[in-house]
Image (cartoon, grey):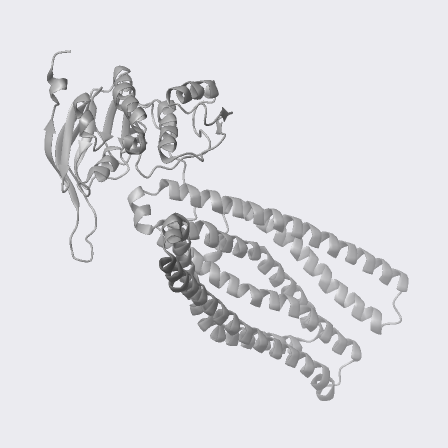
Amino acid sequence: MILRSIVPRRTWGLAVAAVAAGLVGGACAAALIALINSALHRADLSRTLLLGAFAGLMAAKIGSQALARLLLDRFTQRTLMYLCRDLTRQVLATPLRRLEDVGIPRIFATLTDDVAMLGWAAQNVPLLAMNAAVLAGCSIYLGWLSWSTLLAVLAVVVAGAVTYRVLIVRAYRYLQEARDTRDVLFQHFRALTEGMKELKLHAPRRQAFFSERIESATEALSRASLGGLKHHLVADTWSQLLFYGLIGGLLFGGPAQQSQSAERVTGYILVTLYMMGPVWGIIEALPIFARARISLQKVRDLGLSLAPSERAPAPRPTSTAWRRLDFSAVTFAYPSDVDGQAFELGPLDVTFQCGEIVFLVGGNGSGKSTFVKVLTGLYDTQAGSIRLDGVAITPDNREWYCQHFSAVFSDFYLFDTLLGLDPAGLDARAQRFLVELELDAKLQIVEGALSTTALSQGQRKRLALLTAFLEDRPIYVFDEWAADQDPHYREICYKRLLPDLKASGKTVFVISHDDRYYHLGDRVVKLEYGKMVEDRRPLTALSPK
């Protein structure tokens, strides 16, 4: 079951080809052992024929193993490629609210640690099959020499495998603990990078963070990993003792108990020695698959799947001539906190018109940011309906609805390349906006790539606005965009950029505490504790124009 989940269906052909080449190599190896055994004990055979057969088998074995290795490497790289792509598609297709619940550290750990482990396990799938094929070939030859010896060897193998399984169970628990600790460590690393300024300014906090977070997590990770390795070492040592004991029994006990020829005894020893490599290869692969099982469960715990996600159909073109956006009893609620309290937005009943400038106001925790995520379709409504020109927004058309919006969030991310935009004349269009945003002296754009993003926070927000302008969507959302602008450019934002967007037929939602500029909007919508308590028009908006 885990093998089917790890190996992408699109790479099964390569896996089968690698295994087939490995089967040929295993058969040639078994034939070489038989040939070497015969050459050592049978003087009546033609040395010329033996030499020719040896050269042919050697060439076939080396060639088939080289081909198997080449196919295996190609299989491994393509498997990793598909795993990364499919998981990334799944993350991109997962609702934002679900990703927020999961947390960035767990997602990052999955996309790095778990993908690498699954890729490592996938690499061992053909190796496991090839080792099994070699064991099958050797078993056939050993059975041809002596069925009783084959049964004895198989009994030792089964006993070793069962004992190994018993000994390794505790190691699995250590591996699970180590994987959980990695999630915690990734979370601490995120705190390290995002809280660097605060840590630099406070020496006791910095020392406490290192000793109570990093040191404790790394120590726990080391302890769990070493615990797993120790139990694996015990299991591996026991397996080796069994096999060397088997060889000792064949070498010293077999001839004394049975009248067997030296050729047969030598054959037993050669085959058994050759079988030890594949057996240990299979045994060493078991902890890899155990860790892969843990990683696979982590992936599933995120609500993701390793099956290739179907590409979503391209959304139909957005309507630039829309008229009205209706909220009817729209409600969204977060899960309850430890005190049993849950923040709820709504129910909201409101209508927005095309071409409006709407100021969204309210104190911290009033629900402005949550409202924006519901407005833009990033959060699904839990009750009520949103309609765009009478079209109800459902999961089937939510992607189409989202494409009406371009937003600069308060926690925006600035990409260093203008991704997803029409490349025709992109640099020239971007340059014109850079001049308008007063950023033309700070950076250049060449083939859609930004020369730098190392700017002040206000300048970075202006650069984020550049992307929004180039997207040219019918509805814009600016979440505290002007808060980091200097007084000069704040004036430009409210008195020139917003009116220009309105004049071009855009609708703009502005989250702002700059009450000096509310009169420039068409409406001021106020939220308190998730409820809409005010929806008014400023005096200038009511006056004749």
Q: Is residue 16 left or right of residue 510?
A: right
Q: Which residue extends farthest bottom?
A: 256
Q: Please state, as top left, top right, bottom left or bottom right, where the N terminus lies in the image.
A: bottom left
| Residue 308 position by quadrant | top left
Front residue of 86/116: it is 116
| Residue 354 position by quadrant | top left
* Residue 110 % position (x, y): 43, 52
Front residue of 85/503: it is 503
Front residue of 540/368: it is 540
Q: Please state, as top left, top right, bottom left or bottom right, where the C terminus lies in the image.
A: top left
Q: Is residue 97 above or below residue 238?
A: above
Q: Is residue 458 above or below residue 167?
A: above
Q: Is residue 119 left or right of residue 269?
A: left
Please tell me which residue is depicted at 89% across the width and 70% down the height of the picture. Answer: 44
Q: Is residue 319 above or below residue 301?
A: above
Could one spot residue 397 in this view of the protein?
no
* Residue 24 % position (x, y): 69, 56
Q: Is residue 442 left or right of residue 496?
A: right
Q: Is residue 403 left or right of residue 136?
A: left
* Residue 345 % position (x, y): 16, 41
